[in-house]
Image: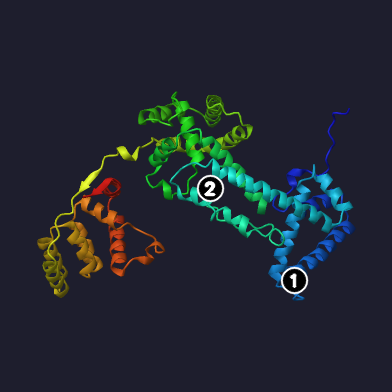
Amino acid sequence: MGNIKNRHIIDSNNLSEESYFISILQEAYACGLLYDSDIENIQLQCIDFLAYKSERYDGGESSSIRVEVAENIMKSNLYTIGLYLKSLPDADSAVSELKSTRIDEIYKKGRDLIDEKIRTVKHIYKLAKKNKVFTLNYTYNATLDDNGIGTFFRLYNPDYEAHETPASIDYQLCNPVINLEGIEFIQKYLENLLIENEFCRNFDTQDIHYLLYGYDEGYKDLLINIFEHVLTAGLGCLLANKSIKKLEISEDEIQFLDKELSKDTNYSLALKLQNATKKLIEKMNIINPLVEEYIERSLPKITSNIAYGIKTNALDKVFVIPINPDLKQKIKFLSGVKMEDEDYRKLINQLLISEYSLDRIAIIKEKVESFNDLEDILFDSELNDEEMALVFDMLEDIEIAALIKQNPFKSDIQAVDLSEAEYELRLNLEEYINHLPIGRKEQIFEMVSVIIDE
């Protein structure tokens, strides 16, 4: 009889992690654990406590504060109270606490708990930075930086904005943190990131770089999750009966997987990946139960990605072939010898006084021999949009690629430091490229990635 568990009246599944205090009151009232008089008493205590906190907010210098400020302080109070109630064994215990303890006392316990959590989270933050993945990805590095998550510890105001999360966090986790705010959100985010780091640190930094570069040469600027790509690659290697150590898979092996996995139903595919996951955990000698649980929690997302890749004939976008950028073939581009300054000035003057577009294009075609002179003319000769397009038509793909390399497309914000001529050239070049056939466009951008100026 001693082993029989107590039956809880409140179903914890009906409670909100984000608004725990309010949901406790609602569920307790619905279950008959709290009556109208109890709810009214708790509400009055919350209002009295808000008045006390509001007075302290401005140091007693004013008898009133803005409505939105008062609302935010109330949210902070309720968050802190809810944080303590969450720490109790169960929801029924939380209701007993509300019936037997004053709101200001419960708040004090929650506030002490926040201080304790801040100390814990600072320690987790140090660990996450210590075992970080060495990568070129900007959002990953920026998020772990002192100006990313680090700002939380400088800006967090647990007395009046305990529910806020004042930090720059752009890096996307494989398993996003949902329904949490304030210190709880930061703690859970860092705990998940710490786990992702621990898993990825089993692989060589260079191999992860090759994998992500194979996914996209510009991965450093993408909002990607490193853990998800590494885990997916590891599972792909196992399914192809390869070692997972280097995260390497070939085009033939991807085609083999496509053929084999396309035979599976959704259920059999999920089962196959579950077995591969168990094998991966065993081969990597993962003994941390938190890492193991996180991998298993990530599996539905990866399974869905693989199923979609099979369905759309794009499995090569899921299982990625690593690329070593240092071994990629390079193209040497010779710009040619520039004309003398005096000759260049005469040419620009001739273009500026020419009345007809076709005459101006003919002059450029006849007299411009070097790429550097051509680029300067595009800046200096005040060509209109149609004339720029005609000049681009004269160029070989390698020359257009060199122009893009020298004048990469940028957002309006990034282009703020460009001159008007530079901005116009990039705008026209981007417009021209966007109207090219897809195959030619892809070929030009491939040249951009491998071209070397000489």
Residue at 72% of width from left, 64% of height from top?
Answer: 73
Q: Say which of 127 and 279 sits in front.
A: 127
State left or right for residue 38 relative to residue 201: right
Residue 331: % across, % down: 23, 44
The residue tagged with tag 2: helix, strand or loop? loop
Residue at 25% of width from left, 48% of height from top?
Answer: 452
Pointers 2 and 1 in contact (C-beta within 8 Å): no
Residue 267: % across, % down: 56, 30
Tell me the mark number nearer the camera, choosing from 2 and 1.
1
Residue at 70% of width from left, 73% of height from top?
Answer: 66
Query: Label 1, on which residue?
Result: 59
State left or right for residue 362 relative to residue 319: left
- Is residue 6 at least partly visible in the picture? yes
In this view, 308 is above or below 267? below
In this view, 213 is above or below 152? above
Q: Which mark, by number, is residue 172?
A: 2
- Rendered image quadrant of residue 197: top right
